[in-house]
Image (cartoon, rainbow, N blue to C red):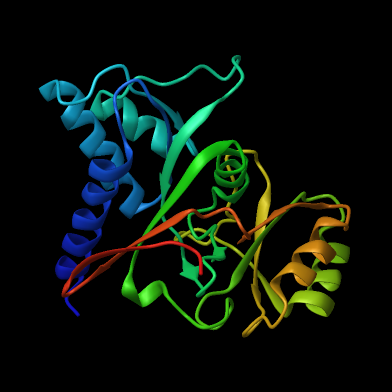
Amino acid sequence: MDLVDVDAQKQAAAYRAVEDFVQSSMIVGLGTGSTAIHATVRIGELLKSGELSDVVGVPTAKSTQAAAIKAGVPLLDDSVVWDIDVTIDGADEVDSDLNLIKGGGGALLREKLVAQTTATEVIVVDESKRSPLLGTNFKLPVEVVEFGLATTREFLALVAGEPTLRVTETGETFRTDQGNVIFDCHTGAIEDVFSLAGVLEAHAGIVEHGLFLGLTQFLVVASSTGVEILSPS
């Protein structure tokens, strides 16, 4: 499918998510990535037109923060306790239970922190992101500290498949907004996502992993035939 068509589908789904789930006076989590940015831009448009008012955002990455400022979306200060009404974000892969792999953009820690602090998590994807088992079509990002990197890499190879250190387009080591690095693990289809998540969370040196389990209330799916909204089975 043409990339322009895919982006148009993502935009339509993101706009639908804003239309259905964002109301005036809400605190809104602003996701990271191209699909989520469409939602941020749309919120800014509706604030400028007066169709929405008193909406404030919580960005999940520095890039999202910049996009929100450009779109005219006010942002909530980090010094206050978040009570987020709804978050609109994207995903790299989603299964039938609406569990996710996220972190392709490197913002998995902040995205998960916001997701765990939101009342309603809305994930917007195109139909290519759906699969029967997580890990089938996308590698699992794992954010780690640089100290003990070789040891952490060996551990990941044992429990999560071959890890590849993420680099930028210019060949430099990719850094998260926290200054950490990411291994993308070739897990293959993951039979027990909760077990793997527990193993990763118990190991020192691992800051966060890209398995988002039981956090999604609604999935907004864009396809060539329109937009569909799903909830966990």
Q: Is residue 114 above or below residue 48?
A: below
Residue visible at 81% across and 56% down?
A: 201
Residue 20: x, y in percent? 27, 44
Q: How many marks?
A: 0
Residue visible at 58% across and 74% down?
A: 139
Q: Quadrant of the rendered structure where residue 185 is? A: bottom right
Q: Quadrant of the N terminus?
A: bottom left
Residue 176: x, y in percent? 59, 46
Left or right? Give the position of 102 relative to 162. left
Q: Is residue 221 above or below residue 17?
A: below
> Given the current orientation, which residue lies at the most extreme left position?
49
Q: Quadrant of the rendered structure where residue 129 is? A: bottom left
Left or right? Give the position of 175 relative to 122. right
Residue 148: x, y in percent? 87, 56
Q: Quadrant of the rendered structure where residue 172 is? A: bottom right
Left or right? Give the position of 35 relative to 93. left
In front of the other: 59 or 116: 116
Residue visible at 44% across and 41% down?
A: 87
In front of the other: 142 or 212: 212
> Given the current orientation, which residue lies at the most extreme front position?
233
Left or right? Give the position of 209 relative to 36. right
In front of the other: 180 or 69: 69
Q: Is residue 193 above or below residue 142?
A: below
Residue visible at 61% across and 58% down?
A: 214
Residue 80: x, y in percent? 59, 15
